[in-house]
Image (cartoon, grey):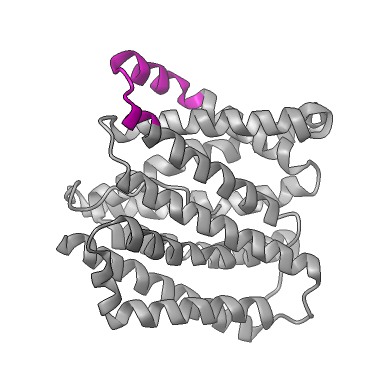
Amino acid sequence: MARTQHQPTSADHPPLSNGLGVSMAVLTLVQWSAVPLFLHHFARTIDLWTSNGWRYGFAAILWLPVAIVALRSSRLSKRDVAAVLVPAMLWFLGQTAFGGAHYFVQPGMVTFAVRVQILFVLVGSLFLVPGTAAALRRSESWIGATLLIAGTVGVAALGPDALSGGDWFGIALAMGGGGLLGLYAVSVQVIKTDLSSLARFSLVIQAVGAGMLALMITLGDRAGLGVAAFGIEGWILLGISAIVGIAAGHITYFVAIRNSGVVIASGTAQLQPFLVLTASAFLFDEVFTVPQLAAGIISVVGAVMLVRSLSKHRSAG
């Protein structure tokens, strides 16, 4: 899946165990690489609203005990409410667009298109995070942005066949979803709260889950009950996707950042498109041309450079 993560900084959480951090970064990569494959599989059998409703509803239930403890142990101020609802809205919209993209294009294409989210992190930070403009004075930022944009365009345009209108719509959904999720990552940095990261995340996932369930009941096939014919295997896959992509994936990512820093954690996550494409080739016969692969490498190199540049700003700040 596209990354919908909180972004604790290495300054706030100094590295404690680099070995643990790298291990958690790799585990996060594997979990998030599985999500687009799950979503594309679900897109063949159930509608978007049903898929998101059941997955996020299940994840919200898993996090409900933490949310209850958070609500009992603290009185939410207006600042706390904003710190939950604003990121929840961005995540809700971003995930809806990201999930919808899988109904038009295959997983590898989706995950390469989502890489643009780091550009939105940069742009959002420029407006909301004091001092981020210093990142624009680094050539690394400009080179990274150029490579990311050029590589993403190349992945979309250099395929074996001309893309249809539906293909371009799917790519636009993936990029839009990535942008919203990038702004989500900025929002959890700039909106201050007295809630702990775990408490805040648990409340955010409750809000997102409630929104997804509302959409499923309103727009889903038979208010989401169409999944009843999914079969036991389908139910198991829905549960696993909710755990690895939502409930557990964010925790491993948080631990990775805390113990090894943003560059290693986020840089490792940039390998996601290649893992997804490799698996998608076997599962869904998705094939990239050599020029597409080259463009994909260029886009990921650009994303890593932007991650490094933003990390340098945070360290300096």
Residue shown at 38%/40% (left/top)? 251
Q: Position of residue 310 (x, y in %)?
A: 29, 66
Q: Where is residue 197 in the image (x, y as percent from the top left)?
A: 31, 35
- Say which of 3 and 203 sits in front: 203
Q: Is residue 146 left or right of residue 167?
A: left
Q: Start and end of the magenta stretch? A: 62-81
Residue 162 drawn in magenta: no
Q: Is residue 206 left or right of residue 231?
A: left
- Say which of 14 and 214 sits in front: 214
Q: Can residue 245 be seen in this view?
A: no
Residue 71 drawn in magenta: yes
Q: Where is residue 210 in the image (x, y as percent from the top left)?
A: 58, 28
**Which quarter of the figure is the C terminus placed in?**
bottom left
- Say which of 39 and 48 sits in front: 48
Q: Can residue 255 be seen in this view?
A: yes
Q: Where is residue 82 in the image (x, y as percent from the top left)?
A: 39, 34
Q: Where on the picture, by quarter, is residue 68?
A: top left
Residue shown at 44%/49% (left/top)? 184
Residue shown at 66%/76% (left/top)? 156
Q: Where on the picture, by quarter, is residue 286?
A: bottom right
